Amino acid sequence: MNTRDENSIRPLLENGLVHLGLSQDRILSLLIKYIEEIELFNEAYGLVKVKDRGELIAKHIFDSLAPISIFHGLPNNKVADVGSGAGLPGIPLAVCMPGTEFTLIERMGRRAGFLRNAIAVLGLPNVRVEESDMEKLAVTEKFDLIVFRAFKPFNSGILKGLLRLLAPGGIIAAYKGRRQSVEDEMGEALGKNQSYAQHSWEVVPVEVPFLEEERHLVLIRT
């Protein structure tokens, strides 16, 4: 990204990060590099569907970071981003939570390669990549917090796979949209399955800078 391009996105990023309480030069610089990597490889790898840079920043970068104040209040020593794709939400969160260990779980080889390259370019020592299906991942460690923006719709089979990776007392956090759709989806996945009756869940509204869409975070506790 040349200086002119960087200057064109800097004000938007700065304003959104201030809104989220994340106004640090280090964070701004790393997110600019990350956006550069996504734009460089997006056409070849199909990482995100956006019409312009502003949409990329609002719908993907800020959406990933919007719940960060919630995550700071949860167990978060080890976090997994399942179905990471372009590294969303894992990489933006890892940039802003340098004391937390992140594992990006991605089954597609080319996208896993993109993730490894992005981690190297950004110099993120707190992030690693597991190239695997969630269901086939060898469970050598378990995670305090599992996040994802994938899995639409969410169902009991997906929940079973996530619970296999979750540490005792851990929390699953699903990025979702409209509240009514979320409640219907979660009721189908949890409410109708007696095996998961002991798991509680709540829907938390999330405000994403510059995104005029209804967004929620679903927290599932074991």
Image (cartoon, helix red, strand yellow):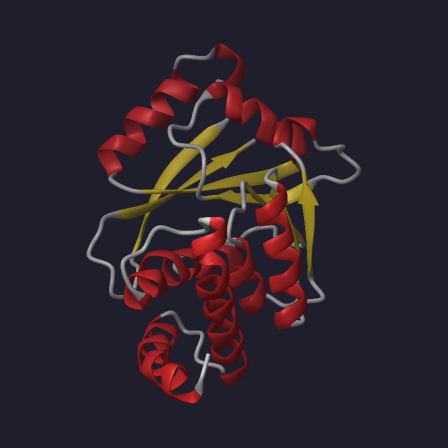
Above or below: residue 156 compared with residue 207: above
104 left or right of 12 in image: right
Q: Is residue 70 visible?
A: no
In the image, is residue 157 above or below residue 80?
above
The answer to whether residue 132 shows anywhere in this view is yes
- Whether residue 76 sits left or right of residue 47 in the image: it is right
Expressed as whole percent of the image width and height from the top left, the position of residue 96 reads 54, 68
Residue occupying image coordinates x 35% and y 78%:
9
Which quarter of the image is occupied by the C terminus? Answer: top right
Question: Which residue lies at the image location 44% right of the left edge and 43% below the top edge?
Answer: 149
The furthest residue to the left:
212
Which residue is situated farthest in the right direction here? 140
Q: Residue at x 76, y 40 (%)?
A: 141
Residue 65 sits in which quadrant? bottom left
Q: Residue at x 38, y 57 (%)?
A: 60
Q: Position of residue 81 (x, y in %)?
A: 57, 46
Q: Is residue 50 above or below residue 199?
A: below
Across and down, in percent, residue 111 comes to 57, 48
Q: Position of residue 171 (x, y in %)?
A: 55, 40
Answer left or right for 191 relative to 94: left
Label tally: 0
* Rendering quarter of residue 182: top left
